[in-house]
Image (cartoon, rainbow, N blue to C red):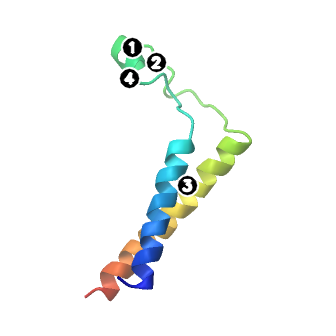
Amino acid sequence: MGALDIIFLIVGLIIIVLSLLQGGKSEGASGAITGGGMNVFVKTKERGSEKIITILTFIFVIIFMFLALLVSILGK
């Protein structure tokens, strides 16, 4: 297991943590069953820490995809 693999795992764990930190944008499973989640396409602005967590998640996903391609290419 090389340094690139360890960085890959760390970035993956960071994405998991950031995804868990994000607030729910709908009412959850009960809203899906009862039809309460009809405001799915309503435009809501993220502010403060929610916006920062969303941006960080997006950045780390891009890094993760780049590392996945790099590990795949260098692994051959």
Callout 2 amino acid: Met
Q: Secondary structure at mark 2?
A: loop
Marks 1 and 4 in Cβ contact (< 8 Å): no
* Earlier residue among tags 2 and 3: 2
Marks 1 and 2 in Cβ contact (< 8 Å): yes
* Residue, far front: 1
Residue assigned mark 2? 38
**Quadrant of the frame with the N terminus:** bottom left
The residue lying at 53 percent from left, 31 percent from top is: 25
**Distance from the alpha carbon under mark 4 to that under mark 3:** 23 Å
**Distance from the alpha carbon under mark 2 to that under mark 3:** 26 Å
Task: Determine whether, in the image, residue 31 is placed left or right of residue 17.
Answer: left
Q: Residue 73: percent from the left, percent from the top? A: 32, 84
Callout 1 amino acid: Gly
Marks 3 and 1 in Cβ contact (< 8 Å): no
Instruction: Bin the neighbour count of mark 4 within 10 Å (Cα to Cα): few under 14, some 14-19, many 20 and up.
Output: few
How many labels, in total?
A: 4
* Earlier residue among tags 4 and 3: 4
| Residue 60 vs residue 43, the one in the foreground | 60
**Distance from the alpha carbon under mark 4 to that under mark 2:** 13 Å
* Earlier residue among tags 3 and 1: 1
Image quarter for residue 4? bottom left
Residue assigned mark 1? 35
* Earlier residue among tags 4 and 2: 4
Q: Residue 39: percent from the left, percent from the top? A: 51, 21
Residue assigned mark 3? 57
Q: Secondary structure at mark 4?
A: helix
